[in-house]
Amino acid sequence: MTGSTRMKASDLLVKALEAEGVREIFAVPGEENLDLVESLRNSSIKLILTRHEQGAGFMAATYGRLTGRAGVCMATLGPGATNFATPAAYAHLGAFPLIMITGQKPIKKSKQGQFQIINVVNLFDPICKMSKQIVHGNTIPAIVREAFRIAEEERPGAVLLELPEDIAAESTDALLIPRHERHYAVADDAILNEAVSMIRGSKMPLMLLGAGSNRRQARLALSEFIESTGIPFFNTQMGKGVVDEGSPNFLGTAALSDGDYLHCAIERADLIINVGHDVVEKPPFFMQVGGKKVIHVNYRSAQVDQVYFPQLEVIGDVARSVQKLTHKIGGRIEKDFSYFARCKQEVETHIKEGADDSRFPIIPQRLVADTRKVMGAKDIVALDNGIYKLWYARNYKAYEPNTVLLDNALATMGAGLPSAMMAAMLYPDRRVMAVCGDGGFMMNSQERETAVRLGLNLVVTILNDSSYGMIRWKQEHAGFPDWGLEFNNPDFVKYAEAYGAKGHRVSATSQLVTIFEAAFKQGGVHVIDVPVDYSENKKVLIDELAAKACLI
């Protein structure tokens, strides 16, 4: 422990946050946070005001996603706290380390009855790894250290700490508890040898990279395994970019649960090495007793259900376990991967269709292709949620980890813009683009003021079809009449300018790349209104896939 003098509890909390390496807190404070705000004023931590608690929560969660260290956000009690529910669920399902600090009325002596008081701790308990009220200043060092440990360890997630205003104001002489790093065990050699035996004994093995493989330390080990063994791989939506998708061994992204061209290869495989499987993403294959075998490689044991029951579990530090597997295999696996190579070519052929289509409004294939043209290997695309997410997951190649930020866990609308803002803060030397449907964009569009105030360089692309397009597509696919899902939008160019951003409207498909390039070169916050035609959804994602036949 480190030394401390007697101080206000809120000062001690801030010192504990500083000891954890916290540099920013994203917040919409209330009167119950005023002691904490004052303590932050005299600290090294920057207080960043957002225009809604969701914006603060999504930014903090994205900080956790991109760095592996918990992001921190703050809100008041009651309605301020409840507005953290969606970011908490976003971090909980997405496995993003997040610390939420909320205020509360005095707990030692009530002065306002039940005004604005709800049981926040119990409310958040089902969507957090820990939800706790601080009841004495002396407990702050231990609670904060434990909160960060729990939020950051595998599987990462959200933690809520409630700080009542009378506790924040009291004095304490508690000592800080220093941060320490953790190291995970490696799978037992006997299990690794069994995995090697299964791989060598298979005829057509495939590697699948899921959400849990998207940890910074795992990329090198996984890349070396694939390059050394020659085993082809594919990924889930949240596994995009973990290993370079420009690799000759990359077959594609399982953007759909079943029935895509990639699934022809998946169906033919007799062994799947499933790295980082997360139950929030249902596996893009269906196991049957006596069918294909699965090796589960992860930090935690598999959660078994009717379609996922692996025959072998390699549990422990993923990077080190994979490194040992690579060493034990000792080189290239001599298998006939010619069928997988043909499937790869089939996938490539189909995702290129429409990439040069000049129709206007723009179709998704051209939109994705034009986005890829202007974004470098390390540049970041942050997707909100809508049908376009499937097109980006399927057609947009990611060459680096966390360069396609999509949410295939909670899949909430409204997170795309704040996520992109956080990426732009962390990586000011990279191009960052938020891609939002008009519905999702309007859910947190006010955060453009935050982006402008922070001086961010950011391009926000709004896909404008004046409707909730994903649900409208599902409505059509289910055989229901097209009804009830259309709305009117503001003039997005004027709306951007009202916030001090630059606004652009695309009037021809050929303009898109030019507008993208000009916006990035000029810098600042740019909003681009792009009319989009989703008629290709049914043609390609339903009719064409239903008629496809796998290679013989």
Image (cartoon, rainbow, N blue to C red):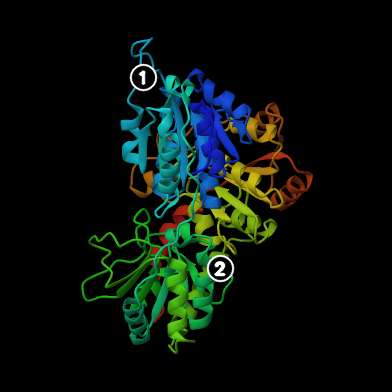
Q: Quadrant of residue 437?
A: top right
Task: Please give the residue where the numbered disc 2 appears in the rendered image.
Answer: 245
Pinpoint residue 80: horizontal percent, then vertical percent: 45, 25
Pointers 1 and 2 in contact (C-beta within 8 Å): no
The 10 Å Cα crowd at callout 1, few under 14, some 14 to 19, many 20 or more, is: few
The 10 Å Cα crowd at callout 2, few under 14, some 14 to 19, many 20 or more, is: many
User: Which of these two is toward me, 76 or 179?
Assistant: 179
- Identified at 35% across, 62% down, the residue is 283
Q: Is residue 422 above or below residue 218?
A: above
Task: Please give the residue where the numbered disc 1 appears in the rendered image.
Answer: 107
User: Which of these two is toward me, 548 or 138?
Assistant: 138
- Identified at 39% across, 79% down, the residue is 205
Q: Is residue 155 visible?
A: yes
Nearest to viewer (mark 1 / mark 2): 1
What element does badge 1 sit on? loop
Q: Is residue 225 above or below residue 504?
A: below
Q: Quadrant of residue 339?
A: bottom left
Amino acid type, label 1: Ile
Q: How many marks?
A: 2
The residue furthest bottom is: 334
User: Which of these two is toward me, 131 or 487?
Assistant: 131
Pinpoint residue 501: horizontal percent, then vertical percent: 71, 34
Pinpoint residue 37: horizontal percent, then vertical percent: 56, 25
